[in-house]
Image (cartoon, rainbow, N blue to C red):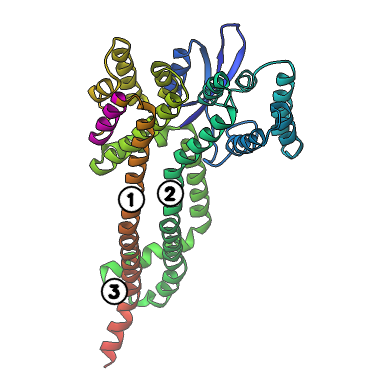
Amino acid sequence: MLFNVRALDARARIVSLPIEAASGKEALQAVAAQGLHGLSARPALRLASAPRGGGLPITLFSQELATLLSAGLPLVEAVEGLADKEDNAAARKVFEQLTRSLYEGKSYSQAVEQHPTVFPELYVALMRSAERTGDLPRALRRYVAYREQTDQVRKKLVSASIYPAVLLLVGTAVLLFLVGYVVPRFSQVYEDMRGNLPLLSQMLLAWGKFMHGHQVELLLASIAGIVASVVAWRQGGIRTRLGLWAESLPGIARRLLVYRLARLYRSLGILLRGGIPVLESIRMARGLVPGALRDRLDAAADEIRQGVAVSQALDGHGLTTPIAQRMLRAGEKSGNLGEMMEKSADFHDEEITRWIDWFVKLIEPVMMTVIGGVIGVIVVLMYIPIFELAGSIQ
């Protein structure tokens, strides 16, 4: 979950930082680990495809900037050109501040570093490393690829959830229509023969009559429940409990771990390939994993600091899979640890994607069977008295 954390830096200035954490307490702890004094942590509600901050879509901006720089435009002119075509007022303000910093003689990494709510620490570190080699366009393109690959599994999950969500919504609407409108009409017809109805039919008709007589109260209660759920979700309590519940399920827990490890490997991979030292890369990437894994990562970093190999330290604290452990060991021997980190992330992302496809194919017929069965039972219970009446006439 993303938190907006306000903190005091070494110069007693208030800064705002986006921190990924399971709770506000962990977000403040992550800020403290960076040498800052945390003041407050509030959940940031934003869609995965929304701009990170300041109204500036960082992925699109980086992609366009890389294209302009590759075409031979100076950095300042490229940023000014992107600013001229921007309609969003907040984004234009960020562009203006970037341009001003560049005209003052600051490097690109120094300019973006002044906007921590827009440009994450990982982005700044990659740009700073690229400035040493003079290959800023390549670093920008690699960051764009990193963001796209990181969001790939999330987008796959969202797209795969659309049909089951629509199916559940339509099924719920049909059930509410039957119980709230059709069943009360039948209850009026069966009013005189209530004592002769089967028990399940009597219960169904009583529930339908109750819903029909308390429509306003039930509607207000539903709205209040939805609002309360949204508020609780924004505060992170429900999300944390759902996460803990999911981690207790044998099949889901392993997939969650693999997904989080893939995200960690991809972040470490792009940092290592960008020339960032391994311990500094771990420090930057630790905010991308939840508290339990973060503690393991810190312990692994301590061992690496003492001279233990990266693959051995990560494996010793449960931060590898059998495939990843072998790939990381091979990367250490060949001197391509960053590349092997990214390949491990690719492998596990593909594994998660295949599992999502399998799960959706399994859950769709199950949902259709359950919803169809419930609707069928309601219809049968409503028509049983008619069948009995027809039988008595014959």
Q: Depth-wise, is mark 2 or mark 3 nearer the camera?
A: 2
Most foreground residue, 345 or 190: 345
Residue drawn at (74%, 21%) of the image: 100
Give the spatial CA distance, label 3 vs label 1.
50 Å
Q: Main secondary structure of the magenta part?
A: helix
Residue 354's disc is 1
Instruction: Give the residue at the far top of this rendering.
Output: 11
The residue beneath circle 2 is: 156
Residue 160 visible (yes or no): yes
Q: Mark 3 falls on what kind of element? A: loop
The residue beneath circle 3 is: 197
Q: Going from the N terminus, do you reach mark 1 or mark 2 first?
A: 2
Residue drawn at (30%, 83%) of the image: 387
Can you give x and y, in whole percent of width and height, for residue 337 in the image? 35, 26
Q: Quadrant of the C terminus?
A: bottom left
Three-letter code for the amino acid on which mark 2 is drawn: Lys
Three-letter code for the amino acid on which mark 3 is drawn: Leu
Q: Quadrant of the N terminus?
A: top left
Q: Mark 2 falls on what kind of element? A: helix
Residue drawn at (75%, 19%) of the image: 103
Give the spatial CA distance, label 1 vs label 2.
10 Å
Which region shows up in magenta? 322-333
Q: Going from the N terminus, do you reach mark 3 or mark 1 first?
A: 3
Membership of 103 in magenta stretch: no
In the rendered view, would you say 100 is above or below 384?
Answer: above
Q: Mark 1 falls on what kind of element? A: helix
